[in-house]
C-alpha cells in the first residue's frame, strides 16, 4: 500500500534529505565533518534567529528538555511549568525527577495560557528561577504566547524562559534573541523534516549565568562541556552523524527558500485545511490556532482512535489521534514535513471517508473542495 | 576521492543497511513498527545471549553508560571503576557527576586488569555496589577479563557487574546470562554496523533489584519507565526510527550468518592484520589482543597523528589515532563494520606508505604480503 505520513512527528522526510543520509558514513573527527558542523551551526543560528551558539545532542527532543532542567537549575529551585497539554506535563515530571519545585499552571486543553496569570504568579514568587513552556502544544494544536511571556521574564534578571519549540521553530515566526527567549529547544523529526534522534538547544547569556550555579547532576546532557567541544569544532560524544548530514541538507534548503517562505507555506497549508474542516461541518479543537497542526474535534459518538486506525490500516495514511485527556476526541493533521497542499486534500478527504464509514452523516468531498478553492486562490 | 572507513567507530555501514534506512520514514506508533520492534528485541536477545529484555535509547553509547549509573546506584554508593584507557576514565567521570564514590583501579594502557586485584579490592570493600568496566578498551585495543570478574561478582548478592561492551558485543564471544554479566551496553556505530545514535542495554534481575533502591535523578534515561514502555511494545520517547530500521536489517543479517561466523570473521581479520604488522617490523601496542581493533605502536620518532592524517587526506582512508596518553604513539585499525580482508590489506599498505613518507625505513608491501598469505591459508 502506498503510505503517507501526515502526522506531527515523525514527519515525511524529503528525498533529498533521505538520499544525503544514505551516503556512506563519514568519520566525525575529520576536517570534512568539521566543515559540515560549522555550516550547520551557522544555519541553525539563521533558523533560531540568534547570535548564540546552538548546541545539539544525539537524543529525542525530550533529551534537550532534560538538559534545560539539569543544567540551569539547582535542587530546591522553584520553576513555573505551563501545562497546556501532554508536553506541558513533561516539564513537571522533569522538575520532579530532578528535585526542582514545580509551580504548575494548568491550562484548559486546546487553549493558550493567559500571560497575566503567569505575571501574577511571578509577582507572588519572585524567586522563581525558570518558566517552562511549549511554544506550541503539539497535543492540542494550541499556540502559546511566548512573546508576551518573554516580555515579562526579560525584565527579571534571574528568571529564564525556557521554550520547548519542538513543533514551532521553523514552523512559524519565533525570534530567539529579539524576543528574549533564553532557551529554545527543537527535535529533528518536526519542522526540520528529518528522522528522529537529534535535538538542538540554544542558550542565552542569562541562562549560561544560571548554569554556572546549577548543582544538579548531568553528564550526557552537560551543556557546558558541550559548549567546550563546540568551540573545538566537535561534540563531546559521538554525534548522530547521519542525522547531522541530513540536517545540513535540510537547513541549506530552508535557507534557500527563505524562512519567511517556509513560514508562509505552513500558514497556507494550515489555512486551507481549516477551510476544509469547517466546510464539511466539523469543528476545530484549538482556540489558539497554530501553523504546525490542525486539530479536528470528533463529532459526538465518534471515536477518533477508530478514524485514525481506518486511515492508517485501510488508506495507508498516518495522521495523529489524541493523547491523554483528548484521546479519542480529536484527530491531528500535520503541516510540518515534506508536504504539499495535495497532502492536505488527501488527509481531509480520508477523514471524511472514515467518518462516513463510522456512520457519521457527512457528504464526501466538501472538505477537499473548500481546501482546493482556498489553495487555488492563495 | 574514494573513501574508506576502517576506524573503530563510526564504522563502514553496509549497502543493505543504508538502503533500509533510506526508505521513507515509518510512524513509530503503528502495528508495522511494533512488529519491527518485537523482531529487533528478539534478535537483540540472540546477540546478547540473554533471556532478559534489551532496552534502547536514542543516544550514543555514553547515554546508556549514564543510564547504568543513575538507575542502579544511589548517592554515596561505592563503585569500582576499572580504568584501562580513555573509556574506563568515563566511568569515574560519570560516578563523580552523580555523587557515586568511585574506587579507581588504574591499569597500564594496553594491558588487561588483573582480576585478583579486583577481588582484593572487593574483599576490602564489601559494600561496593557495582563494578564498572569495559569488555574491550577501544582506546588501547586491550581485551578485559569480564568472565573472570563475573566469576567474582556473581557470588556477591548485592554487587553488580556493569560492562561497556560497545566494541565487544557482536565482535567476539560474550555470554551475558551464562557468565553473569548484569548490565551489558553497546552502541550502534560499532559491531552492529550502523550509524551512531542508538544505544542498547541489558539488565539482569539482580540489577533490577538494585534499581528499585536507586535515588539518583533520571528521566530521559529512566530504565524502569523504558521497561514499562517495552512491555507495551513501544518506547517512552520518540525512538531513533531510522536507526532501528537499520538495526532490524543488521540483526537479521547477523543471525543468518550465525554469531559464531561473525566472531570468526573478526578473528580472521584481526589475525591477518597482526601478521602483517609483525612482518613489516612494527609492534603491537596491546598486551591483551582483541578481535575488535589492531593497535600498532608507532616507531620511535614517528607521530601517529601524522600517519593518520596522511591516510585520511592523501589516501582517503580513515583509521584511528591514539587518544589521551596514547596520542601520537599508536594507530588503530578496526575489524568491525562492513569490512573484508582486502580492507585490512589496504590499511596495512597505506600505513607502510605513510611511514616511508615520514622517513621511517620500511620496505613497502611486506605487511600486505604477510596478511595475504594468512588470508589465503585461513
Image (cartoon, coloured by chain):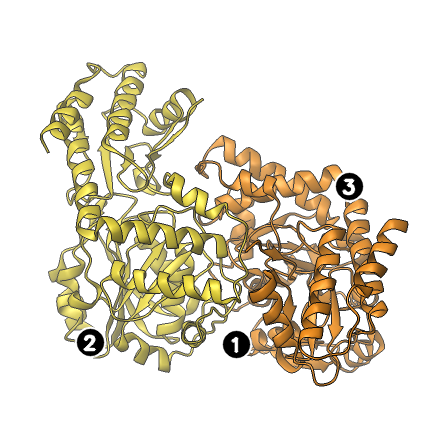
Chain colours: A yellow, B orange
Q: Quadrant of residue B344?
A: bottom right
Residue in view at x 59 percent, y 42 percent: B15
The circle drawn on residue B97 is 1
Dot 3 corresponds to which residue?
B258
The circle drawn on residue A20 is none
Q: Is residue B10 above or below residue B79?
A: above
Mark 3 residue element: loop
The front one of A264 and B277 is B277
Rendering coords of residue A16 (x, y %): 39, 42
The front one of A168 and B104 is A168
Please tell me how many numbered marks the rendered image carries: 3
The chain to which mark 1 is attached is B
Which image quarter holds the C terminus of chain A? Answer: top left
Of circles 1 and 2, the one toward us is 1
The chain to which mark 3 is attached is B
Which image quarter holds the N terminus of chain A? Answer: top left
The span from disc 1 to disc 3 (Cα, nearest Å) is 40 Å
Amino acid at each position: 500500500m502506498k503510505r503517507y505520513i501526515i502526522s506531527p512527528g515523525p514527519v515525511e522526510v524529503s528525498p533529498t534529505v533521505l538520499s544525503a543520509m544514505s551516503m556512506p558514513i563519514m568519520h566525525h573527527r575529520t576536517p570534512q565533518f568539521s566543515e559540515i558542523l560549522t555550516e550547520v551551526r551557522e544555519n541553525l543560528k539563521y533558523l533560531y534567529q540568534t547570535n548564540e551558539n546552538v548546541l545539539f545532542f544525539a537524543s529525542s527532543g525530550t533529551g534537550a528538555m532534560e538538559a534545560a532542567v539539569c543544567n540551569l537549575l539547582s535542587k530546591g529551585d522553584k520553576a513555573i511549568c505551563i501545562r497546556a497539554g501532554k508536553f506541558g506535563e513533561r516539564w513537571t515530571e522533569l522538575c520532579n525527577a530532578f528535585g526542582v519545585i514545580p509551580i504548575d499552571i494548568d491550562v484548559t486543553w486546546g487553549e493558550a495560557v493567559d500571560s497575566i496569570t503567569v505575571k501574577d504568579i511571578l509577582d507572588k514568587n519572585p524567586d522563581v528561577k525558570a518558566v517552562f513552556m511549549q511554544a506550541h502544544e503539539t497535543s492540542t494544536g494550541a499556540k502559546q504566547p511566548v512573546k508576551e511571556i518573554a516580555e515579562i521574564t526579560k525584565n527579571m534578571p534571574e528568571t529564564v524562559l525556557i521554550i520547548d519549540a519542538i513543533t514551532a521553530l521553523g514552523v512559524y515566526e519565533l525570534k530567539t534573541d529579539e524576543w528574549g527567549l533564553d532557551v529554545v529547544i527543537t527535535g529533528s523529526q518536526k519542522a526540520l523534516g528529518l528522522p528522529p534522534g537529534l535535538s538542538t538547544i540554544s542558550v542565552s547569556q542569562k541562562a549560561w549565568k544560571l548554569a554556572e550555579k546549577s548543582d544538579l547532576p548531568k553528564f550526557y546532557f552537560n551543556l557546558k562541556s558541550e559548549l567546550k567541544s563546540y568551540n573545538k569544532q566537535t561534540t563531546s560524544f559521538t554525534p548522530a552523524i547521519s542525522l547531522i548530514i541530513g540536517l545540513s541538507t535540510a537547513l541549506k534548503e530552508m535557507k534557500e527558500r527563505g524562512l519567511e517562505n517556509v513560514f508562509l507555506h505552513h500558514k497556507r497549508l494550515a489555512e486551507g485545511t481549516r477551510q476544509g474542516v469547517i466546510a464539511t461541518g466539523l469543528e476545530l479543537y484549538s482556540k489558539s490556532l497554530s501553523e504546525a497542526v490542525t486539530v479536528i474535534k470528533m463529532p459526538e459518538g465518534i471515536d477518533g482512535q477508530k478514524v485514525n486506525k481506518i486511515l492508517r490500516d485501510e488508506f495507508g495514511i498516518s495522521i495523529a489521534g489524541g493523547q491523554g485527556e483528548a484521546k479519542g476526541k480529536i484527530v491531528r493533521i500535520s503541516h510540518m514535513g515534506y508536504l504539499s497542499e495535495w497532502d492536505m486534500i488527501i488527509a481531509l478527504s480520508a477523514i471524511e471517508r472514515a467518518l462516513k464509514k463510522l456512520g457519521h452523516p457527512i457528504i464526501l468531498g466538501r472538505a477537499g473542495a473548500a481546501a482546493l478553492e482556498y489553495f487555488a486562490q492563495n
